[in-house]
Image (cartoon, helix red, strand yellow):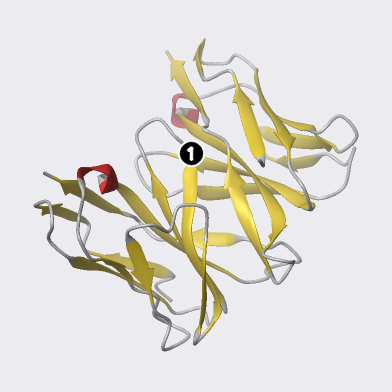
């Protein structure tokens, strides 16, 4: 069974701290890994990672994939209260004999940034 | 360009009632998806479609049906609502943007079955 596991489940940090969120996966037919941010609404796309060792950056957020060890991390530096959200990791894999691909999601990490 | 829209935003159903959740996208995406998200959980795929007239089951299809008569619309039907279907439902569509297979999500429908 395809599995995506995120840790920690929840995290409370002070504004200005740096946080690292983890995502490990055990899936067949891996295609890519995605990170989403979910506030009180639909998930919004952050990063898509396909190749190992190549860091993707967007402002204070960065992410990297290790396809050998089957995990990814999402780093947020100098956290702000606006970073408070659930961060979802999802893996794209081939589905139904490869005719389509689907996202399998982890349960998410709930991040709370306090003043 | 509205992206992915869903209606209604909220709905309360009694056990055994039926309803259709509407989803429309204006990005001309071929792939469309329905997910459900239970409290504190990740998203689970219910049904997906690779184009008009083509649909297939996801991980948790029981109790639901879909149709895809046009590229834009992908409604999800609940025939006999059960309390286990209380959840938030997200519709998504996928295109290729800058080489990334980005899924765009609608705002969600919060459904309660009593």
Is B52 placed above or below B44 here? below
Decide which of A2, A10 is in the foreground and name it: A2
Question: What residue is rendered at 60% in x and 47% in y?
Answer: A104
Quadrant holding the N terminus of chain A: top right
Decide which of B95, A14 is in the foreground and name it: B95
Whether residue B29 can be seen here = no
> Where residue B31 sits in the image (x, y, percent)?
57, 73
Whether residue B24 can be seen here = yes
Q: Which residue is mark 1?
A: B42
Callout 1: few (<14), some (14-19), or many (20+) C-alpha neighbours within 10 Å?
A: many
Is A34 displayed left or right of B10 in the figure? right
Q: Chain of mark 1?
A: B
> Where residue B105 sits in the image (x, y, percent)?
46, 59
Question: What residue is rendered at 34% in x and 63% in y?
Answer: B64
Q: How many marks?
A: 1
Secondary structure at numbered mark 1: loop
> Where residue B110 sits in the image (x, y, percent)?
25, 49
């Amino acid at each position: 069974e395809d599995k995506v596991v995120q840790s920690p489940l929840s995290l409370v940090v002070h504004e200005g701290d740096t946080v690292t969120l983890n995502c490990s996966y055990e899936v067949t037919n891996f295609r890519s890994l995605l990170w989403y941010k979910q506030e009180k609404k639909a998930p919004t796309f952050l990063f898509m990672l396909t190749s190992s060792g190549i860091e993707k950056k967007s402002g204070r957020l960065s992410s990297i994939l290790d396809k050998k060890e089957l995990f990814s991390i999402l780093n947020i530096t100098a956290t702000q209260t606006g970073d408070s959200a659930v961060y979802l990791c999802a893996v794209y894999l081939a589905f139904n004999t490869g005719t389509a691909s689907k996202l399998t999601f982890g349960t998410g990490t709930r991040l709370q940034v306090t003043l | 360009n509205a992206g992915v829209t869903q209606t209604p935003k909220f709905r309360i159903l009694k056990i055994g009632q039926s309803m259709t959740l509407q989803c429309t996208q204006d990005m001309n995406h071929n792939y469309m998806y329905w997910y459900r998200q239970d409290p504190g959980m990740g998203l689970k795929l219910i049904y997906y479609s690779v184009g008009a007239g083509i649909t297939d089951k996801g991980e948790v299809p029981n109790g639901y049906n879909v149709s895809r008569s046009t590229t834009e619309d992908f409604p999800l039907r609940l025939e006999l609502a059960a309390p286990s279907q209380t959840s938030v439902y997200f519709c998504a569509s996928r295109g290729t943007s800058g080489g990334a297979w980005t899924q765009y999500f609608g705002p969600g429908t919060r459904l309660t079955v009593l």
